[in-house]
Image (cartoon, rainbow, N blue to C red):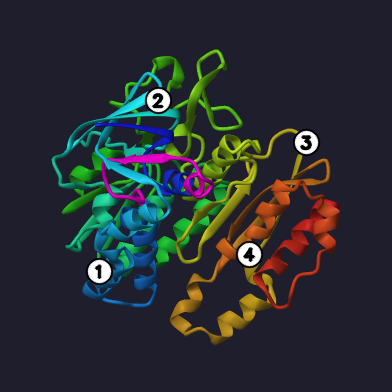
Amino acid sequence: MFTTADVCVVGSGSGGKMLAQQLARAGRRVVLVERGLVGGFCPYLACVPSKSLLLSAAAGLSWPAARAVRDEATGGRDDSAAASELAADGVVLVRGTARVEGRGVLVEGEGGPHEVRAGTVVLATGSTPVRPDLPVDLPTWTSEEALAAGELPAHLAVVGGGAVACELAQAFAGLGSRVTVLVRGEHLLSREPAWVGDRLAEVLRADGVNVRTSASLEVLADLDVDRVLLATGRAPATAGLGLDEGWLTDAGAVRTDARCRVVDASGAVVEGFCAVGDVTGISPYTHTANHQARTVVSELLGRGRDADYRAIPRAVYTHPPVFCTGDTTGGDGVRRAWFDVTEVERANLLALSAPREQRRTLTGGVELFARDGVLVGAACLGPEADSWGAELSLAVRARLDVDLLAHHVRAFPTWSEAVYPALEELRG
C-alpha cells in the first residue's frame, strides 16, 4: 500500500498524538504510525496508573479496590477511544513498525507493507526502560509491568532513586507490600538539591519503606524479595528506525535544534525531519513532549518559535509531592535561600485538623536560586507543591526579578506564602 501525506508522525505518545491532531485540524494531510497503544505509555502504563495507585494508597484502599480504580482510569488499556479521536480529526492511523526510508516511512504491519511518503517526518517514538543485569535470579518488573500488574508482591525491591522509583515505592507500600528501595547514590532524586532527596527518604521511611542509599545490587542476594522493580531510567527508542548514525547522540537520542528539527553531528538541519518527546533525550516528561509538539506545529504552519527548556517542571507525585524547575545546581554567581514550608499558617491549620497519626508526615521546604537578582531555579517539597510551585516555574521562564516576586500578593493562608521569606533573603 502507498500513501502520500504532508506529515507522517511516527509514534502516538502524548506529543505525537497532539501534533498529528493539531496539524490535521489546520488542514494538513497527516498519517500517524503506531505499533502499540494509541496515546503511548502515559495514559495506560505510566503517568495515569501511577498517580491512580498513589491516590488509592493515600485513601487507604485495598489492593483489589486500587487495581479496579487503576483499570477504570486507564480505560482497561483500550485505545479505541484515542484512535477514534484521531479519525474524527482526519488523521490516518497506520498500525505497525516503522522504518525511515529516504524522505518517507516504510511500515510493516498486519496488513502487509505500507509505504508513506511525506513532506515532513516527525519522530516521536518515545523511550524504552533500561534493564540492568542483576547478580541474582529474581523475577523482575519494569515500571510498565508494575503498573499493569494483577498481583501485589509480598516484598518488592525497587532498584533506583528517581521519580518513578519513589512514586511506586510509596504506592506499593501503601497498598500492602513490604518495600525496599536500593539507591546507588547517597540521595534520592540525585539531580535535585540533596535536602529534597533526604526529606523524601524520611517520608518514605515513615511510610514503612526501607530506603537504602549507597547500596549495591549485591545486597539483593540477602533480601527475601519475590519481585524486583527496575526503575533505573529509560533510553531513547531509536533501534530499528533506520536513522542515520550522524543524527544520533552518543546516548542514542535524536539530535534536534531549538525548533525541534533533526540536525546532524555538524549541527546542520536535516531537511524534512523533526523529533519530539523522549526520543530527543532532552527532558523525559509528557509536558515536555507536548511543548515540543507545539513548537513543531508552529514551525510547520509557518509561525516559527523556539522550544524553551529553562523552566520545565520536574514533578514527583509522592505524598507530599516534589516540584523543581530551572537551574537548582547553584554555581558561580548564584544566590540561594531556603525556607521551611511547615512554618506557614496553612501548615499549622493542616496539622491541627489532620488525624494525629498523619501529622508525622507534614514536612517540606522551598529553596530559591537567583542570579543577578533574577530567579533561575526553585526546588519545592511539601503539600500541594506540584500546584503552588507552578508560579515559580513561570517566574523562571519569564525571567522575573526577585524584587517583583517579593512584592507579588499571594492569598492567605496558602502554601505559596512560603516563598516570601526565601525571596526576602535573596533580596538581602
- Residues marked 4 and 1 touching at CB (< 8 Å): no
Residue at the spot of label 2: 252
Q: CA distance from mark 4 to mark 1?
A: 30 Å
Q: Tell me the magenta residue range.
A: 22-41
- Mark 4 or mark 1: name the one nearer the start of the chain: 1
Q: Which is more N-terminal, label 3 or label 4?
A: 3
Marks 3 & 1, CB-CB < 8 Å contact? no
What residue type is disc 3 on?
Gly
The N terminus is located in which quarter?
top left
Quadrant for residue 419, please give it. bottom right
Task: State the image coordinates of residue 416 (x, y, percent, origin top left).
Answer: 68, 67
**Three-letter code for the amino acid on which mark 1 is drawn:** Arg
The answer to whether 40 is drawn above or below residue 248 in the figure is below
* Residue occupied by mark 3: 333
The residue carrying mark 1 is 67
Residue 152, image quadrant: bottom left
Find out whether the residues at labels 2 and 1 contact each other: C-beta distance under 8 Å.
Answer: no
Q: In the image, which disc is placed on residue 388?
A: 4
How far apart marks 4 and 3 lie (CA) works out to: 27 Å
Q: Is residue 15 left or right of residue 220?
A: right
The first of marks 3 and 1 along the sequence is: 1
Determine the residue positioned at 30% across, 67% down: 70
Q: Residues within 10 Å of mark 2 (few under 14, many from 20)?
A: some
Assign a secondary structure to mark 3: loop
Q: Secondary structure at mark 4?
A: helix
Q: Amino acid at mark 4?
A: Trp
What is the x, y in percent for residue 356? Answer: 47, 84
Question: How far across and down, in percent of the image, does residue 53 sit?
Answer: 34, 66
